[in-house]
């Protein structure tokens, strides 16, 4: 989960308020101390932390005094609860403010079918640019758009191979060259080619450098002039913490980019620092990178982000994700609805629904969107659940057409053996298919693009 440690520490600070018997200024100071310590450890700028602390105190203290005046009366318990809610809300709102770039909302960028939009990705080497290009391509592809990738990174050896490999895996058309050394020429050729083929979204991956240098900025501006992107996106490594502020300022001065994607927020303790530093520069963050896999890209929105981090879920995000999956294959969803109306549900339907869930991304991404669920699913439990789902996917892949199109009744007798009780003794058809499938289907599933086991999250 994104910024799991920070989320856990903030959550436990808020829990301590709920558990405390009396709420006064001392209790407020204690919770703020824990919150500030957690933020500082995540490399949030000390001035921003100080501001957060002061704002919460300024808001809460006068109201707390009023509530305290009622304590000791018959409304004691109610007043206590009100004080706790007040502190929770004030801290939550200030955490949101910390990652909110303010009025500078992300520029409207909603690619639609039938109109070519070009996105140019810039950033330092190693920030996660190439990986993010493919993730973004997958994101738009899932929305039913025709997407292509152009590799204009002629600086890093192997950059084209990396993009090619990622694009092939994501089944996204790509353009690049082993011989052309001029990034401006390549990007222009690629964009022209895909424009003429009426692609909806063309993503251009540009070169990075180890550090900010004039050569990188010159090249960036030349490509920008040549391909005239509809949106330029800066990819920033979240692991750099509050140094993200200086980096985004430098890029901003060199070229006019529209938005930022902060990567590597899954494993790095400094991610909170990076997001708050970027927000402080009033630059919109549109997505965050939450892992190395294709689906590990999340839309960024301050309130749902903080809510999820604190284990309070993001139901709107979950609904959106489910709608995205339905949009990717509307025919299948419609057929499913018709069948369900008629009371039909086969093993194949179950397989397809499970594949849909697996394609929605790692289970942790989904569970963290359901309030309270993230906390219930510890890291190990999630890994176990993912393993179980993969095992079931292998079992489905080993089934015959007759078995898949059945209502599953023919497996009923095989249940004890299939559940492992009859280990090694199962003679019935169901058991043989089950165990044989679980072992033998792996190669087949990986080679089958549509198979659930072929999804990128399977490569763990
Ligand atoms: P580029 O030089 O900017 O194109 O960077 P790459 O796309 O090659 O990424 C550099 C490394 O960061 C690779 O090992 C990626 O797998 C990894 N990476 C990229 N995005 C993320 C992310 O969101 N989370 C994690 N954990 N790793 C990432």
Image (cartoon, helix red, strand yellow):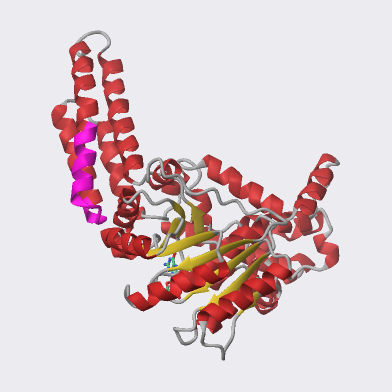
- Looking at the image, the residue that sits furthest to the left is 26
Asked where in the image residue 355 lies, by quadrant, the reply is bottom right
Rendered location of residue 152, percent (x, y):
53, 78
> In the image, is residue 360 above or below residue 194?
above
- Looking at the image, the residue that sits furthest to the bottom is 179
Q: Nearer the viewer, residue 197 or 87?
A: 197
Rendered location of residue 378, percent (x, y):
42, 54
- For the point 31% across and 44% down, the residue is 98
Q: Nearer the viewer, residue 304 or 6?
A: 304
Report if residue 451 is visible in the image: yes
> In the image, is residue 215 above or below residue 121?
below
Question: Quarter of the picture for ligand 1?
Answer: bottom left
**Magenta-colored span:** 40-56
Compared across the picture, whether 361 is left or right of 243 comes to right
> In the image, is residue 226 above or below residue 186?
above
Is 41 within the magenta? yes
Compared across the picture, whether 416 is left or right of 183 comes to right
């Amino acid at each position: 989960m994104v910024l799991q440690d920070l989320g856990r520490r903030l959550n436990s600070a808020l829990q301590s308020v709920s558990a405390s018997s009396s709420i006064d200024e001392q209790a407020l100071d204690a919770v703020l101390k824990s919150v500030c310590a957690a933020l500082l450890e995540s490399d949030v700028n000390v001035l921003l932390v100080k501001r957060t602390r002061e704002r919460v105190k300024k808001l809460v203290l006068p109201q707390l005094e009023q509530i305290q005046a009622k304590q000791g009366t018959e409304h004691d318990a109610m007043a206590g609860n009100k004080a706790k809610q007040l502190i929770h809300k004030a801290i939550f709102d200030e955490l949101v403010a910390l990652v909110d770039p303010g009025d500078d909302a992300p520029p409207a960028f909603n690619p639609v079918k039938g109109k070519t939009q070009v996105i140019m990705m810039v950033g330092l080497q190693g920030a996660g640019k190439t990986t993010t290009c493919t993730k973004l391509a997958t994101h738009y592809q899932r929305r039913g758009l025709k997407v292509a990738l152009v590799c204009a990174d002629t600086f890093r050896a192997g950059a084209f191979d990396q993009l090619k490999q990622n694009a092939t895996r994501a089944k996204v058309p790509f353009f690049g060259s082993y011989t052309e050394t001029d990034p401006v020429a390549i990007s222009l050729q690629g964009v022209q080619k895909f424009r003429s083929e009426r692609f909806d979204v063309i993503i251009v991956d540009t070169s990075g450098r180890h550090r900010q240098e004039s050569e990188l900025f010159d090249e960036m501006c030349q490509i920008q002039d040549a391909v005239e992107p509809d949106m330029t996106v800066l990819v920033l490594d979240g692991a750099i913490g509050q140094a993200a502020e200086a980096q985004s300022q430098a890029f901003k001065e060199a070229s006019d980019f529209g938005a930022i994607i902060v990567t590597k927020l899954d494993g790095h303790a400094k991610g909170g620092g990076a997001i708050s530093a970027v927000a402080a520069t009033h630059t919109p963050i549109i997505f965050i990178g939450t892992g190395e896999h294709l689906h590990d890209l999340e839309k960024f929105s301050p309130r749902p982000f903080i809510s999820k981090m604190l284990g309070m879920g993001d139901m709107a995000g979950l609904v959106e994700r489910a709608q995205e999956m339905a949009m990717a294959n509307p025919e299948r969803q419609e057929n499913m609805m018709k069948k369900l109306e008629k009371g039909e549900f086969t093993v194949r339907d179950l397989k397809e629904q499970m594949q849909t869930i697996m394609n929605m991304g790692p289970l942790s991404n989904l569970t963290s969107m359901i309030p309270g669920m993230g906390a219930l699913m510890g890291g190990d439990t999630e890994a176990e659940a993912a393993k179980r789902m993969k095992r079931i996917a292998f079992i489905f892949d080993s089934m015959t057409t007759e078995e898949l199109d059945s209502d599953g009744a023919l497996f009923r007798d095989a249940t004890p053996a299939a559940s492992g009780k009859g280990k090694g003794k199962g003679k019935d058809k169901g058991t043989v298919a089950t165990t044989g499938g679980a072992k033998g289907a792996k190669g087949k599933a990986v080679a089958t693009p549509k198979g659930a086991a072929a999804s990128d999250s399977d490569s763990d």
